[in-house]
């Protein structure tokens, strides 16, 4: 008994006497077991084939099919499969890897498939989107014409229901600080993730306090019809403009090219790639534009003025109220939402559009507090058309 067990447990060489006694029965019993197993396998296969054929268990067939087909058809993948946008926005790419991947662009002008250009709404937030219900109403019925991306604090766990257009639209995020390069990194991250969907054509940066001012079709047509991208960019000669320029930024950035503008931009696909792929200006701004030089007010406007000055409208699409003065624009709460205010926002100005004049200047407005949600929902149909 002992001699049987010991060699296995302690790895000792079994004695010659034991070997002669046990060598034969063991393989024979194994062979028997193996044969029995084989017979059972064959029988099982026949039985399952029979049941599938004769009782039409389709799901079993399709399940087997779907598991096998990708392997067999690897040499026959359609273009649609190659360029399909990722369904799950979470990924493990580093920024370096992501920006590189996002910088891919086709060099043949015509798409060999019917491309329906989409708007990418990119929300740069700390956490929740208190005005989500307003946006859901605005977006309702236009599912094929937009995508949503949300960059928030990495610790934030959104709780959107499955039915919400915001569900699962969180991108891998990092802590971003206003006025620092990390905020531009977050914006680049939003652009890069949105670029992974080849159908995204217009990229709009928004905050949680932004609202749309027109119905979806008006906004879509305005962007589609525009010859320019809407990036705020002006030549501020004062201390908060040129005063923030450093000579060390030359020769990449000349003082005459130094621009200032609102962070809330709209860019087309080409400019989005310009931004994502940039390393030349990035280094200069990272090194020489630190508070009180607020890099998010200067980096993209200056860079795009140098690289693509002819194709930006030099104005933002996002309305904001600076009329109260001070370092921060006005925030509107529930009690501020009156017909007068909304009329002032929507009808208050004329501006240049494709070289002509348009009464539609801003497509979005900020800053709206969570308490403004209910009054906005009540007035949206009358005032904004959604
Ligand atoms: C590849 O797929 C196309 C369309 O799905 C099909 O028409 C074609 O016969 C397939 N070719 C091969 C070699 O399987
Ligand atoms: C999500 O959480 C917020 C508070 O963080 C709460 O006000 C809201 O009702 C929640 N939404 C859903 C759909 O559970
Ligand atoms: C959107 O608003 C415009 C102008 O107010 C109107 O002509 C159009 O019919 C509206 N579209 C939809 C889908 O409601
Ligand atoms: C750079 O700025 C100087 C003035 O400081 C100007 O003379 C020069 O033409 C500018 N160069 C470019 C390329 O804009
Ligand atoms: C925007 O400003 C740049 C110079 O900073 C200019 O070249 C361009 O024409 C302007 N765009 C429009 C639409 O006026
Ligand atoms: C915008 O232009 C129209 C027509 O040119 C004019 O009637 C209107 O008063 C202008 N609005 C503003 C706010 O300047």
Image: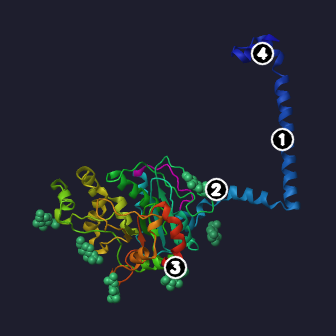
Give left or right: position of 3 versus 299: right
Q: Which residue is denoted by mark 3 in the rendering?
A: 382
- Whether residue 356 is visible, yes or no, is no
Give left or right: position of 143 versus 153: right
**Distance from Cα at disc 1 to Cα at disc 4:** 29 Å
Check whether the beta carbons of the residues at disc 4 and disc 2 lie within 8 A of each other.
no
The answer to if 90 sits in the magenta stretch is: yes
Color encoding of the figure:
rainbow
Q: Identify the image quadrant of residue 36.
A: top right
Q: Position of residue 346 (x, y in %)?
A: 41, 77
Tell which circle, 4 or 2, labels the residue nearer the N-terminal end.
4
Q: Which residues are magenta?
A: 85-95
Crowd tier of the residue under label 3, counting other residues whose Cα lies within 10 Å: few below 14, some 14–19, many 20 or above: few
Secondary structure beneath disc 1? helix
Mark seen at residue 293? none
**Distance from Cα at disc 4 to Cα at disc 2:** 46 Å
Q: Position of residue 309 (x, y in %)?
A: 27, 71
Residue at 63% across, 63% down: 163
Q: Which residue is denoted by mark 2 in the rendering?
A: 71
Check whether the beta carbons of the residues at disc 3 and disc 2 lie within 8 A of each other.
no
Crowd tier of the residue under label 1, counting other residues whose Cα lies within 10 Å: few below 14, some 14–19, many 20 or above: few
Crowd tier of the residue under label 2, counting other residues whose Cα lies within 10 Å: few below 14, some 14–19, many 20 or above: few
Check whether the beta carbons of the residues at disc 1 and disc 4 lie within 8 A of each other.
no
Q: Nearer the viewer, mark 3 or mark 2?
A: 3
Q: Which residue is denoted by mark 4 in the rendering?
A: 5
Residue at 85% across, 53% down: 48
**Distance from Cα at disc 4 to Cα at disc 3:** 88 Å
Say how many tags the image has: 4
Q: Nearer the viewer, residue 92 or 24?
A: 92
Q: Nearer the viewer, residue 156 or 9?
A: 156
Q: Which residue is denoted by mark 1 in the rendering?
A: 38
């Amino acid at each position: 008994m002992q001699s049987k067990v010991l060699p296995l447990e302690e790895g000792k060489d079994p004695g010659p006497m034991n070997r002669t006694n046990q060598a034969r029965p063991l393989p024979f019993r194994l062979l028997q077991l193996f044969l029995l197993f084989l017979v059972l396998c064959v029988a099982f296969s026949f039985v399952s084939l029979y049941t599938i054929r004769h009782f039409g268990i389709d799901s079993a067939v399709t399940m087997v099919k779907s598991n096998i087909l990708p392997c067999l058809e690897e040499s026959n993948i359609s273009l649609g499969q190659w360029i399909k946008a990722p369904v799950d926005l979470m990924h493990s790419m580093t920024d370096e890897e992501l920006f590189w991947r996002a910088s891919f662009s086709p060099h043949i002008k015509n798409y060999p498939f019917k491309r329906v250009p989409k708007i990418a709404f990119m929300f740069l937030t700390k956490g929740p989107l208190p005005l989500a219900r307003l946006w859901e109403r605005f977006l309702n019925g236009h599912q094929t014409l937009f995508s949503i991306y949300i960059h928030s604090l990495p610790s934030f766990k959104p709780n959107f229901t499955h039915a919400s257009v915001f569900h699962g639209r969180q991108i891998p995020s990092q802590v971003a600080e206003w006025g620092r390069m990390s905020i531009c990194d977050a914006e680049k991250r939003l652009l890069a993730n949105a670029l992974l969907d080849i159908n995204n054509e217009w990229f709009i940066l928004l905050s949680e306090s932004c609202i749309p001012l027109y119905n979806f079709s008006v906004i879509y047509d305005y962007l589609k019809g525009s010859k320019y991208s809407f990036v705020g960019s002006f030549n501020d000669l004062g201390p908060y403009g040129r005063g923030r320029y450093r000579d060390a930024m030359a020769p990449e950035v000349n003082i005459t090219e130094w621009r200032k503008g609102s962070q809330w931009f709209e860019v087309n696909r080409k400019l989005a790639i310009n931004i994502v792929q940039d390393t030349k200006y990035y280094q200069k701004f990272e090194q020489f534009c630190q508070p009180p030089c607020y890099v998010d007010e200067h980096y993209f406007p200056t860079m795009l003025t140098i690289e693509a000055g002819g194709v930006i409208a030099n104005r933002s699409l996002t309305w904001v109220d600076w009329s109260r003065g001070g370092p921060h624009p006005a925030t509107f709460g529930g009690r501020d939402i009156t017909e007068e205010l909304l009329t002032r926002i929507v009808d208050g100005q004329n501006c240049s559009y494709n070289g002509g004049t348009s009464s539609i200047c801003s497509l979005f407005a900020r800053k709206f507090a969570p308490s403004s949600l209910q009054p906005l929902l009540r007035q949206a149909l009358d005032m904004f058309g959604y």
